[in-house]
Amino acid sequence: MQLARIIGTVTATVKHRSLERAKLVVVQPLMADRQSPDGDPQLAIDLVSAGAGDVVVMSSDGRLLRDTLGSDTTPARWSLIGLVDDLPTARHPR
């Protein structure tokens, strides 16, 4: 699992059959500081109704995605499995 920020949506006129009813979004994976990018943006299946700018938890659990989409041949890799409401800051003892 990894935190990411929604940076856009995807419109496709032709999709793999397993993705016909799926909402596709572009996410930017985030580093541990929850601000810095961690690699290139990725395409993900939105299972949590996230919106642009939302911080989400994404997973590359293939079995979850195959079961959710009802397809053993889906080309999708990432799925959004949670919305992050608040990002607490780490507090260090003095």
Image (spheres, helix red, strand yellow):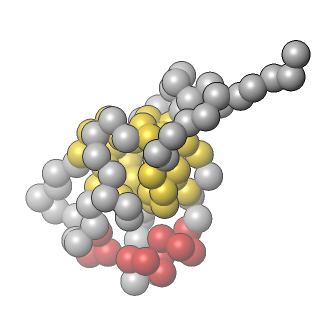
Q: Residue at x 40, y 83 (%)?
A: 70
User: Percent x, y for residue 41?
Assistant: 42, 36
Q: Quadrant of residue 53?
A: top left
Q: Residue at x 28, y 46 (%)?
A: 51
Could you say which is closer to the camera, residue 56 or residue 63?
56
Query: Can residue 17 be seen here?
Result: yes
User: Percent x, y for residue 65?
Assistant: 48, 71
Q: In this picture, is 23 found above or below 30?
A: below
Quadrant containing the C terminus in the rendered view = top right
Task: Work out which residue is located at the far front of the displayed protein and give it.
Answer: 94
Q: In this picture, is 59 found above or below 68?
A: above
Q: Residue at x 58, y 65 (%)?
A: 61
Q: Residue at x 26, y 75 (%)?
A: 17
Q: How many marks?
A: 0
Query: Can residue 31 be seen here?
Result: no
User: Percent x, y for residue 59?
Assistant: 55, 57
Q: In this picture, is 53 found above or below 50?
A: above
Q: Quadrant of residue 3?
A: top right
Could you say which is closer to the camera, residue 35 or residue 43?
35
Could you say which is closer to the camera, residue 55 or residue 9?
55
Q: Is residue 70 left or right of residue 13?
A: right
Task: Work out which residue is located at the far right of the displayed protein and give it.
Answer: 94
